[in-house]
Image (cartoon, grey):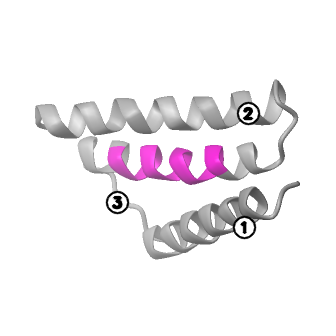
Amino acid sequence: MNTINMISLLFEVLAAGLGVKIALVNKKSFGWLIALTFAIYVIYDLSRFLSVSLPAHDLLFLTASVSICAAIFLIANRK
């Protein structure tokens, strides 16, 4: 894993953690969706780093895409 991949992974972990903070501290449900999206990215990147095959990686990316779209919808429609 090169330096750029490591930096990207660190930002993904940070984004997932901030999503959890938004959910727990700010009591915003979209935080869980953000955390889920970036947790999936972390899992995928770690699997590449560790050379572990993810048989359902297409399903993981679909889940991440749906999750972030739902989060954006909730953010856009909050009052």
Q: Which of the 4 quarters of the picture holds residue 16?
A: top right
SS category of the residue bearing label 1: helix
First reached walking from the N terminus: tag 1 or tag 2: 2
Above or below: residue 71 compared with residue 15: below
Q: Which of the 4 quarters of the picture holds residue 22?
A: top right
**Residue 73 has which mark?**
1
First reached walking from the N terminus: tag 3 or tag 2: 2
Q: Which residues are magenta?
A: 34-45
Q: Nearer the viewer, mark 3 or mark 2?
A: 2
Q: Residues within 10 Å of mark 3 (few under 14, many from 20)?
A: few
- Residue at 52 percent of width and 36 percent of height: 15
What secondary structure predominates along the stretch shown in magenta? helix
> Residue 69: x percent and y percent?
63, 69
Q: Disc 2 marks which amino acid?
A: Ile
Instruction: Inspect the magenta stretch and tell me whether residue 44 lies in it.
Output: yes
First reached walking from the N terminus: tag 3 or tag 1: 3
- Residue at 88 percent of width and 54 percent of height: 79
Above or below: residue 38 compared with residue 71: above
Q: Quadrant of the N terminus?
A: top left
- Residue at 33 percent of width and 51 percent of height: 52
Pointer 2: what residue? 22
> Residue 30: x percent and y percent?
76, 50
> Residue 72: x percent and y percent?
66, 62
Q: Is residue 7 left or right of residue 2?
A: right
**What separation in Å lies between label 1 and label 2 (alpha carbons)?**
16 Å
Pointer 3: what residue? 53
Above or below: residue 48 compared with residue 17: below
